[in-house]
Image (cartoon, rainbow, N blue to C red):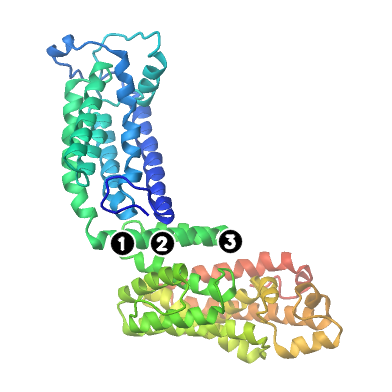
Amino acid sequence: MSDSTALFGWPASGELKRTGALTFGFALFFLVVYGGASWVTGFYPGGLRVDLPIEQHIPFIPGWAAVYVSMDVLLLLSLFIFRTWRQMLPFALALCAQTVVGALCFLVLPVEVAWPPRAVSGGWMQVFQLADTMNLERNYLPSLHVAFACTAALAYRERSGPVARAVFALWALAIAASTLLIHEHHLVDVLAGALLAWGTWRVVAPRVREERFLEAVRVEALCARELYRFARRHPRYGLIALALYQQSVGRWRKARRARAGFCFLQLVDDVLDGDRPVEGEPLDHIDALIVRLETGAPHVPGASSEFHDTATTLGRVLLAELTDDRAREQVLELVRTMRKDRERVRDGRWWDAATLQAHLANTFRLSVELMLHVADARVHSNEAPSLLAALGWCSVMRDLREDLAQGLFNVPADVAAEVRAGGHDPADMDALLASEAGRTWALAEYQRARALLDRSALELAALEGRPGASLLRLFHRSVESFWAKKLPRRMPFLRQSSVLGTS
């Protein structure tokens, strides 16, 4: 790895992915905002004239288009100057701020250029056409080309010696001159771009460099990455992600505990289920995580770095932002409850029906109570016991095939024994449902769920009007939909049930 004090260097692989993502994100943001402003102003009937009399004497020199397009090279140098995402972020956000301010100016103060028509032929024609295409149309005041070049010079000078500072300053000055010499901008545009660069860099960079801001960005990046990974595994997590971000609008800071909490608990669940592979026994990693969260230890020997860094960060954010000691205790209690499923898988245990139902009810009591607390609800999970039981039923039947394949046996031990006695393997979904005992159990569970949902509807009706009741009703509707539509499609024999038409 290169010397961190050197001006140029090659970033570490992981950091290059992050700084590259910032670069790509800015490029996409710029295309949408800058291009959108150009498209909107295309409907304007005309624009302001900002040309000065002195500009009549500025020659048109097509060859300076090569300097104009060199701005992309100047910006891309940031990947080798800012070799970590923390170093790159102030630069990237300053450019984003300039893009937004510039777009607003384009929309409010549309400018009409006063340069005469330009005709280019010969060797510089293609370079000039590239420069003219980069500029699009009508986006003139301020010149973002000048703003970006000046921002690069200001940002790079902080890591440069005297010679490099002079080179970057002259490069930015040459780019500013090129906008005039190829008649893309007027003097007012150039001056406004330079002032925009100076102002945004002075305002944005110090604030973005604050550790609190950088840590908040890191947490949001971790949440976004985990939500993306969850959604890749199953579309329902994509819907959850959209709901989380939608609920965060207007209350972003306060809703961070919901985003971090969901990602933390789902990540723990994925590790325990084997959906997120870790080296060695998952229980060892979860136990090490609990130690880190309870003691604040910076490192536990043998910890898997990516999982532990992510889970510890998100877990600490959740615990720090919960306002109730009992809620913080419930987070760790829920993790310990979840780890029991992995113990069952490791030991190949089959539980009886009462033990299974009690375990599922406790899991959903804790998880729903945490959701309600995060949502500032005024209802509690123990006020809707039938809904908790219905959620446990839904979880079992929805993931039955996958759980059995992973060795998580959510079929009661006595049912499994009957299935084996009939010559079938209860750990195989198809074999289970091919047996009389397995089908009888599935039908009984289906009827039990109907009774739970009917009682849940009465419990929720008694909570009507209290903050948080709507969230419980949302869960209820989700289970109702699974009971009435999705599960009968998976198990057609359930359609013969006499309870199918009841509600």
Q: Visible in this render: residue 346?
A: yes
**Seen in the image, is 291 located left or right of residue 108?**
right
Q: Secondary structure at mark 1?
A: helix
Comparing labels 3 and 2, the label whose residue is closer to the camera: 2
Disc 3 vs disc 2: Cβ atoms closer than 8 Å? no
How far is mark 1 from mark 2, CA to CA? Answer: 10 Å
Mark 3 residue element: helix
Mark 3 closeness class: few <14, some 14–19, many ≥20 residues within 10 Å: few
Q: Residue furthest right?
A: 423
Q: Nearer the viewer, residue 134 or 238?
A: 134
Whole-angstrom CA distance, mark 3 to mark 1, is 26 Å
User: What is the three-letter code of the residue carrying label 3?
Assistant: Arg
Q: Earlier in the sequence, mark 3 or mark 2?
A: 2
- Circle 2 residue: 222
Q: Residue at x 56, y 67 (%)?
A: 478
Which residue occupies 33% across, 28% down?
70
Q: Earlier in the sequence, mark 1 or mark 2?
A: 1
Residue 211 lies in quadrant: bottom left
| The C terminus sits in image quarter | bottom right
Q: Picture coordinates of residue 374 (x, y %)?
A: 37, 72
Q: Residue at x 41, y 50 (%)?
A: 16
User: Between 40 and 38, which is closer to the camera in this rendering?
Assistant: 38
Question: Quick one: 188 or 111, which is closer to the camera?
Answer: 188
- Pointer 3 or 1: first along the chain: 1
Q: For marks 3 and 2, give the CA distance.
A: 17 Å
Residue type pointed to by label 2:
Leu
**The label number, if any, that marks residue 233 in the structure image:** 3
- Callout 1, which amino acid? Ala
Q: Is residue 205 found left or right of 349 in the rendered image?
A: left
Packing grade of label 2 (10 A; few <14, some 14-19, many >=20) is many
Q: Could you say where residue 438 lies in the image, as x and y percent from the top left?
A: 78, 80
The secondary structure type at the circle numbered 2 is helix
